[in-house]
Image (spheres, rainbow, N blue to C red):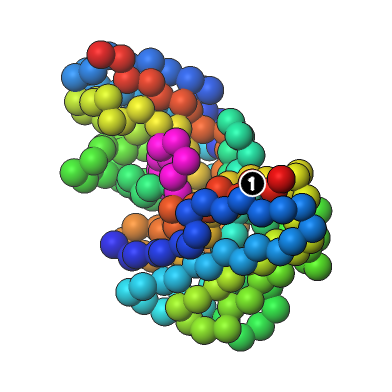
Amino acid sequence: DAKTTQPPSMDCAEGRAANLPCNHSTISGNEYVYWYRQIHSQGPQYIIHGLKNNETNEMASLIITEDRKSSTLILPHATLRDTAVYYCIVKASGTYKYIFGTGTRLKVLA
Amino acid sequence: GAVVSQHPSRVICKSGTSVKIECRSLDFQATTMFWYRQFPKQSLMLMATSNEGSKATYEQGVEKDKFLINHASLTLSTLTVTSAHPEDSSFYICSTEPREDYGYTFGSGTRLTVV
């Protein structure tokens, strides 16, 4: 099963862009990369997902490298409410199961 | 996006009793739902896959007789923690099967404390 690795924690100044990296070197060709975030004591919230093209929505941008071995989630103007744990997930091959890694704990500083 | 309602949000029970957690899909029919457990400062760990009209599939190391899952309809899956012990205290979260546009939708979670 594909696995992801993320830095355990990051700080970002309020109003600045937060760039969260994720490595998924064993990803298969038809597997999507999903990003979620979890604010303390809540269920994870969907942010964005992509296959190979860069994606953008109202919450964030997702940049996927050409070889698909890594990706970066970009929060263009981080706010204090973006403080959360961010999970990069690749769906397990042939199943619907998500395998959660340890995620990145992003702290946005005033 | 999809809406998933999970209840209760918080429950305290005595050791040895059973607790039922409900997960409802409010705006679509979910043939498959997932149950996760999360200990403090740790990531989510998949416990089991709930299948409508059939038996749940449990992950390795999860006791099926302790964590009873029922998926009797396309909109409701329940997790019952039987004979709860303090070590079962955790944050339990359900999710739907993935949707094409936005992946999985998670419930808001249930904080279980066994005293």
Is residue A78 found left or right of B47 in the rendered image? left
Residue at 42% x, 79% y is B29
In front: A13, or A67?
A: A13
Position of residue A109 relative to residue A86, above or below, is: above
Q: Quadrant of the C terminus of chain A?
A: top left
Dot 1 falls on which chain? B
The image position of residue A90, as x and y in percent, is 51, 47
Circle 1: element type: strand
- The residue at the point 44 percent across, 45 percent down is A42
Question: Which residues make up the magenta segment?
Answer: A33-43
Q: Is A80 drawn above or below residue B56 in the view shown?
A: above
Q: Is residue A57 left or right of residue A32?
A: left
Q: Residue at x 33, y 65 (%)?
A: B2
Q: Is residue A14 above or below residue B106?
A: above
For the residue marked with disc 1, what is the amino acid? Thr
Q: Is residue A50 above or below residue B77?
A: above
Where does residue B56 sit, x and y in percent of width and height? Answer: 68, 73
* Residue A41 is inside the magenta segment: yes
- Measuring from the top left, give residue B93's x and y in whole percent: 54, 54
Count residues near mark 1 (Cα–Cα under 10 Å), then give few for <14, some for 14-19, many for 20+: some
**Residue at x 65%, y 63% (from the top left corner):** B19
Q: Quadrant of residue B90?
A: top right
Q: Is residue A47 visible?
A: yes
- How many numbered discs sit on the rendered protein? 1
Q: Is residue B75 left or right of residue B21?
A: left
Residue A65 visible, this orientation: no
* A39 part of magenta stretch: yes
Query: Of residues B30 and A1, which is closer to you in this image?
Result: B30
Instruction: Give the image quarter of residue A18.
Output: top left
- Provide residue B95's location: percent of width, then percent of height: 49, 60
Disc 1 designates what residue? B113
